[in-house]
Image (cartoon, grey):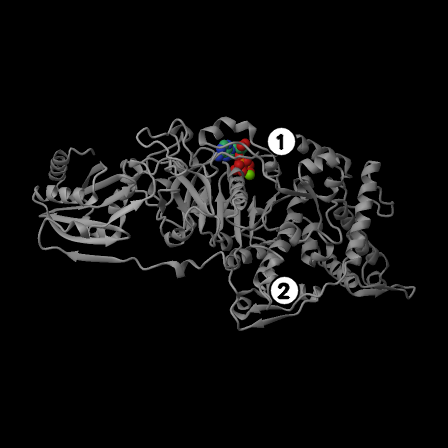
Amino acid sequence: MNETGNQDTPEDEDPENPPQGDDKPISLLPKSVLPYHPRVVEPIDLHVDLSVGVVLGRSESFHRKYHSGGLGMIGGVTETSDDVLTSLMGMPVLLDLMSPHVIFVAGKRGSGKSYTLGILAEELALAMERREIEVAAVVVDTVDVFRQMVDSNDDQMDVLTKWGYEARGFPVNVYIPRRTYVGLPDEVKKKARLFPLSIGPKELTTSDWGYVLEKGGSLSTVMENLIGETLDSVRKGYTLESGEYVKLKRDFSIKDMIECIDSNPTIIEFYKPASRTALIQRLRRADRLGVFHPGGTSAQDLAVAGQITVIDVAPLGSDAEAVLAILTNMLCRQVLTYRMAWTDDGTSAREELPPTWLIIDEAHTLVPRSGLTPAKDAIVSYAKLGRRFGCSLVLCTQQPSAVSDEAISQADIIISHSLSHDNDIRALQQRAPAVMPEQFRDKVFISSLPRGVALVFDQATENKRGFIMQVRPRLSQHGGTDRLSGLFEAVKLLMPEDHEEFTDVTEPEEEVTTGGEVEELEKIEETEEEFAEDLPEVPRPPLKLSKEDWQVLDGWMREYVETLFEEQKQEYSITDEASPRVEEVPETEELIEPREVQIESISETPIDVSKVLVKTFGPVSKDLLSKATTRKILYSHSSHDFLFTSKDDHREVVIIEREDTAPSDLIGWVAAGIDSTGLEVENLIHEDGFTFVCFRKEGIRAIFSVGASQSLLVLPIVIVGIDRKHIITLADKIRSIFHAST
Ligand SMILES: Nc1ncnc2c1ncn2[C@@H]1O[C@H](COP(=O)(O)OP(=O)(O)OP(=O)(O)O)[C@@H](O)[C@H]1O
Ligand SMILES: [Mg+2]
């Protein structure tokens, strides 16, 4: 099997072009996998490479350099056109994974968004297996749908076979809340590739605590002050009534915080017992979530080069959002900081964290349009700055109108499944980074897109308009419906639920867990505690940050960087030097070569055939070769300007195909044939390896151009003019001269 999906299936094999060795021509996807394929009136104009398919997120010049390298097959074009020649129906769609992107995935409930995110994760994993890219991908998941990527998608074998794929799982690492992790049997942990997830309490700011302790983040001012003071005391150390000094801690637990509230004389003096009790209650509840723990999971654990990591916080139920927001905040800030800084002996600060793809499902909860979450500013900064340092962001939501516009406006690619609310449709229309055909604006149309079908918009100038795509089937499993989900539920039942906020605090804390579980938890706690205390200090080399990058950072982000390096005891300086850019991602602009367009006047016919360039393609089918050459004539600026002068123009296309014929013979013959109808050669336009041979007579214009693939030559003639009848008659005449087909 070929994992880019461009493989022959019995249904789409072209009998005239049998596959030859390894150099198979690209095949269109069979109609049977594209059941929904509406007709779209506006001509489709996309970046097509006939040896791979439609290319998203890449300029032509970038693509010329890397060809099929670093592309991920995400689906197929599923729209038909009045013009069979230019239709791209069935063409595979490939997304660039080599350069950084901000991708926005939208769609109503159940439309297939999370499934599509899974496709992106699979393609990142496949491209890494092929050693075409090396990144870290972190998928943040509140609803338990990505964990099963470890299993193969055996439920959709039939459809996978039709697409030419085989089901398979991927070795993703799955981080689940530490408490849930501890409650699971070893063999399950191993098989499902589970790891314990925890957050060091020191990572949380006062407002983060507000968000965790009071859903919605609105703690009373007293409580907020109290938590602030508590954090300050445990960080700096404080003196007890007895005179004993509680020394400062590099890392601390919720228990340390509770102890401080209970015994720090300053706090006891200034805060009423009721306030202290209330805060302690809430801290205990947060502690029971089993995720806040010293020496928490670090950004370095989660963002690992070559690895797909899923953070599955679904077992936390209604607390999942707060935990995820804090984690995402930490991840975004650390990835940005470390990608931005470098050392003099290379770029080793960057080695701490690789270029990272952050994939966020249910993004409206983390980056809402209105209101704040602990992650909002960090995600917006990541969206704005990440690309400078090779980092990508994928945001997914069912409510585009509820996601921060600052984040969506950074998207260079939008994939929208079905939407039904006016606000959401409007949000999409405002942000689509490519032309949106009239038809796509219709509410009935967009709300009736079937599951797994999406409208795709790409900012790359080569992909001028949005188009309809069928998302490919998943190789690995989607959704959390396995035995493990049942186990998650079971573990949750074993965990003490603390619904009452103000139970009697004087009662000793009792863990309602099984004996073995508590033991294991304690064992882990002990080793983690040791780990946190005894970690030897390793001197870190001084870091540099470029002034240019520093200046674009928001105030809070600068503050964060300062604190982070201070804590790490790592020196840093802001320099005038430019930051060394990530090498594997060349700047697109530098690669764009000016297109050479030369126009040559010809006074006499027949033309000098040696001047006509023949564009040579790799091994492709006759059909695709005709389409590509015709599209070039229709859509290149120079030829388009020559042919089309009014919106009432009618066009006819005559295609001449020959095998084993010398190009010069064919060109001479066709030029003479057209000449015999009274059309006269006006000039030759050379562009991108093609030559457009231009003819004119009164109100009629015509162009031919030649494309070649192996021993095959294709020569489309496009004839244009206002007088429809006249054009049809002329086209028929030319057809009869050359015995050509339409
Ligand atoms: N391209 C596809 N091919 C086949 N099945 C699909 C496809 N996309 C989605 N599905 C199926 O449709 C169902 C819903 O998909 P998914 O979970 O991705 O929806 P969603 O848009 O994320 O919904 P929600 O808003 O509830 O999160 C799943 O059972 C999934 O297997
Ligand atoms: Mg979903």
Q: Is mark 1 within 8 Å of ligand 1?
A: no
- Direction bottom: furthest residue: 576
Horizontal and vertical percent for residue 715? Answer: 21, 41
Label 1, on which residue? 481
Horizontal and vertical percent for residue 723? Answer: 12, 41
Q: Give the left or right position of residue 508, taking residue 430 as reference.
A: right
Q: Residue at x 40, y 26 (%)?
A: 10
Please give the label number shown on residue 230. Answer: none
Q: CA distance from mark 1 to mark 2?
A: 41 Å
Q: Are marks 1 and 2 in contact (CB under 8 Å)?
A: no
Q: Secondary structure at mark 2?
A: helix
The answer to whether 239 is drawn above or below residue 33 in the figure is below
Evaluate whether residue 220 shows in this view. Answer: yes
Horizontal and vertical percent for residue 690? Answer: 25, 50
Q: Give the left or right position of residue 291, taking residue 136 as reference.
A: right
At label 1, which amino acid type do we have? Thr
Q: Give the left or right position of residue 631, taking residue 463 as reference.
A: left
**Frontmost residue, 636 versus 21:** 21
Q: Quadrant of the C terminus?
A: top left
Circle 1 packing at 10 Å, graded few (<14), some (14-19), many (20+), is few
The answer to whether 228 is drawn above or below residue 460 in the figure is below
Q: Give the left or right position of residue 523, taking residue 119 as reference.
A: right
Q: Residue at x 60, y 34 (%)?
A: 151
At label 2, which amino acid type do we have? Val
Label 2, on which residue? 561
**Frontmost residue, 475 versus 657:** 657
Evaluate whether residue 419 shows in this view. Answer: no
Horizontal and vertical percent for residue 392? Answer: 52, 52
Q: Secondary structure at mark 1?
A: loop
